Image (cartoon, rainbow, N blue to C red):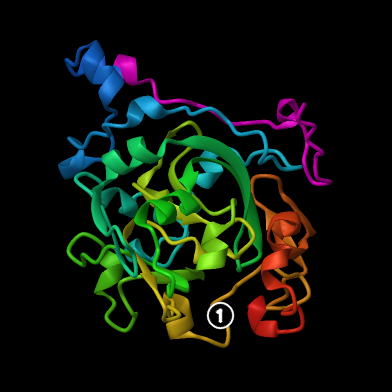
Amino acid sequence: MLIRKRRGWEIPESQVTPEHVFFNRRRFLQAAGFGAAGIAASAMVGRGAHADETIPTADLYPAARNDRYMVERAITPEKVNTTYNNFYEFGSHKRIYDNAQDLVVRPWTVTVDGMVAKPKVWDIDDLIRTAGVEERVYRHRCVEAWSMVVPWTGFPLSKLVEMAEPQAGAKYVRFETFLDPDMASGQRQDWQPWPYVEGVTVEEAANELPLLVTGAYGKPLPKQMGAPIRLHLPWKYGFKSIKSIVKVTLTDQRPVSFWETLQAREYGFWANVNPEVDHPRWSQASEEVLGADRRIPTVIYNGYGDYVAHLYKGMEDQRSTFM
């Protein structure tokens, strides 16, 4: 018999307060003239010129929740999380959710290449169905000192890496987002190092926590949250969780990320959450809980030390490990 011991920051699923407000696909699609088969196969997304986009994997949502990954706080209301976003491809302000609707999410491919035995260009929906999805409730901590709790849907990054079969010399996983200045107004700022790039070590990628996210709140992922596929690293500051991924590369060279390129002193490669290491311009000791009108103390590794602290053994005194 398997006996699971809950960690100190976990609570039972019954005590988490989700904000699942699902798409009413049936009413909308029937009004648009779709039959039952179309309802099961797709959901309408987008606006204006892109209103004909469909999500062929919409039938996978809501996915079953994996109660191994729970938190001690209530889930942030969906309206808060979908209207307060960083997505610099579409602007530097927090209310970019409207601008982000210009993102075209179908068709979409994800290239997996580099030091792998099985490079492949995946159609996004083939990848999602092949990998399978589950829901995980994770904290999200921004380096700007605010936080959320989100019910993400997706699959482990480790699964994608395993399918690619890394070569022995691969040390890092590099991620890259799309580059389309005609579509994304923020990418017209040529002083910024587009496209957005991020990276982790292969050891971090093999950990059970990193999630390739394809949905949230029981639905396909909204555009402003990084549709159709993004990364979430719950123990790292949020800028590490790259949005709208088009390329994943296994390499022996450490990636230089978007924010590290702009300001390495403020945004390092590791970016592990640590309340004792301040950002050069503000404290990281506490965080604003969005949707709750309160501040709370920040926890080392954002509360996920049981999962990831061993990855940094012997590096605890290195400031660069955390910022």
For the record, the magenta segment spans: 1-27
Amino acid type at image mark 1: Gly
Q: Position of residue 44 (x, y in %)?
A: 27, 31
Magenta residue check for 35: no
Position of the C terminus, as image quadrant, is bottom right
Question: Quick check: 176 above or below 76?
Answer: below
Give the quarter of the image for residue 174: bottom left
Look at the numbered disc 1 and give the secondary structure of its residue: loop
Magenta residue check for 2: yes
In front here: 289 or 200?
Answer: 200
Position of the N terminus, as image quadrant, is top right
Question: Quick check: 240 above or below 257?
Answer: above
Q: Residues within 10 Å of mark 1 (few under 14, many from 20)?
A: many
Label 1 sits on residue: 268
Q: Residue at x 33, y 21 (%)?
A: 25
Q: Residue at x 23, y 49 (%)?
A: 108
Q: Describe residue 272's horizontal placement relative to residue 251 as left or right.
A: right
- Look at the image and tell me whether residue 280 can be seen: no
In front here: 320 or 309?
Answer: 309
In front here: 76 or 61?
Answer: 61
Q: Describe residue 294's horizontal placement relative to residue 166 as left or right.
A: right
In front here: 9 or 81?
Answer: 9
Q: Position of residue 11 (x, y in %)?
A: 78, 36
Main secondary structure of the magenta stretch: loop
Q: Position of residue 235 (x, y in %)?
A: 64, 60
- Look at the image and tell me whether residue 296 can be seen: yes
Q: Position of residue 283 (x, y in %)?
A: 73, 75
Question: Quick check: 182 above or below 153?
Answer: below
